[in-house]
Image (cartoon, rainbow, N blue to C red):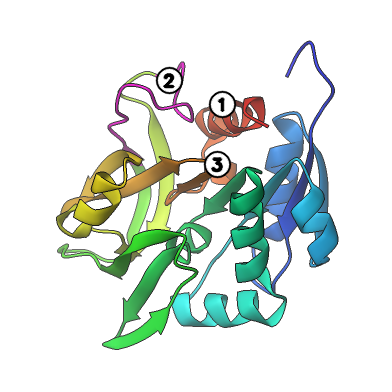
């Protein structure tokens, strides 16, 4: 973040955990960070981070309670960057399915978040990712770089056709089957892994995101 003023970033507080670790990580990467549910601040900030832990339906309900779905839609309309993390990534899709129950998402991107077909769940720990050419989030990172995941649900690559057709840049990881580890499409980006728990590699991803603000 050299050569220009530090961007102002809001970490959206909608009742989902992990706010403070996200706040600290984004600040370490070079931003001025505010944690708030205020819609005006969230729309006007240079960047918006949407964290998330727990169940898709519960996170989506909390997000709607503060108008978070509208905040994300408004920022996308205005061309202002958004970064979703973990369930904060999942809620950007059209819907999520957990235990056979469907819940609507923000609909920023097409696709259904579903349970991974893997012998061991949750997928917990360090894993490599395969970032395509042109990824801005993973610029400067080696192919063998590992990131920290904790999840049982994801956008499975078997269901990623509509998102690929929309022209999104999709970074892939594998646990039992391939899934979307990160998505970059327009001004909206997201990671299924936790950059705030991924050490130096996570800091680089966050710094790369801040560079686009």
The part of the image, by quadrant, that contains residue 133 is top left
Q: Residues within 10 Å of mark 3 (few under 14, many from 20)?
A: some
Is residue 87 found left or right of 128 in the rendered image? right
At 55% from the left and 75% from the top, the residue drawn is 59
Alpha carbons under labels 1 and 3: distance apart: 18 Å
- In percent of width and height, residue 60 lies at 54, 76
Q: Nearer the viewer, residue 55 or 83?
A: 83
Residue located farthest toward the front when viewing the structure as drawn: 77
Q: Nearer the viewer, residue 160 or 147?
A: 160
Alpha carbons under labels 1 and 2: distance apart: 8 Å
- In percent of width and height, residue 94 lies at 38, 69
| Secondary structure of the residue carrying numbered label 2 | loop
Q: Which residue is mark 1?
A: 204
Q: Are marks 1 and 2 in contact (CB under 8 Å)?
A: yes
Q: Quadrant of the C terminus?
A: top right
At 42% from the left and 79% from the top, the residue drawn is 104
Q: Which residue is mark 3?
A: 187
| Secondary structure of the residue carrying numbered label 3 | loop
Q: Which mark is residue 141?
A: 2
Which range is magenta?
127-141
Alpha carbons under labels 2 and 3: distance apart: 21 Å
Q: Residues within 10 Å of mark 1 (few under 14, many from 20)?
A: some
- Vertical order, 40 against 3 (above or below): below
Q: Earlier in the sequence, mark 1 or mark 3?
A: 3
């Amino acid at each position: 973040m050299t050569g220009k003023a530090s961007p102002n970033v809001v970490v959206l507080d909608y009742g989902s955990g992990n706010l403070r670790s996200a706040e600290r990580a984004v600040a370490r990467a070079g931003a001025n960070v505010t944690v708030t549910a205020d819609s005006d601040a969230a729309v006007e900030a240079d960047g918006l981070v949407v964290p998330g832990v727990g169940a898709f339906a519960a996170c989506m309900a909390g997000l709607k309670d503060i108008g978070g779905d509208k905040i994300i839609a408004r920022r996308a309309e205005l061309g202002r960057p958004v970064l979703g993390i973990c369930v904060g990534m999942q809620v950007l899709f059209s819907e999520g399915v957990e235990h056979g129950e469907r819940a609507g998402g923000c609909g920023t991107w097409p696709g259904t978040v579903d349970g991974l077909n893997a012998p061991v769940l949750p997928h917990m720990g360090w894993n490599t990712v395969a970032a395509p050419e042109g990824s801005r989030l993973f610029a400067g990172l080696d192919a063998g770089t590992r990131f920290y995941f904790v999840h049982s649900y994801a956008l499975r690559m078997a269901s990623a056709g509509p998102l690929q057709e929309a022209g999104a840049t999709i970074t892939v990881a594998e646990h039992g089957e391939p899934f979307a580890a990160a998505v970059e499409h327009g001004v909206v980006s997201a990671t299924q892994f936790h950059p705030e728990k991924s050490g130096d590699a996570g800091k680089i991803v966050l710094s790369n995101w801040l560079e686009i603000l």
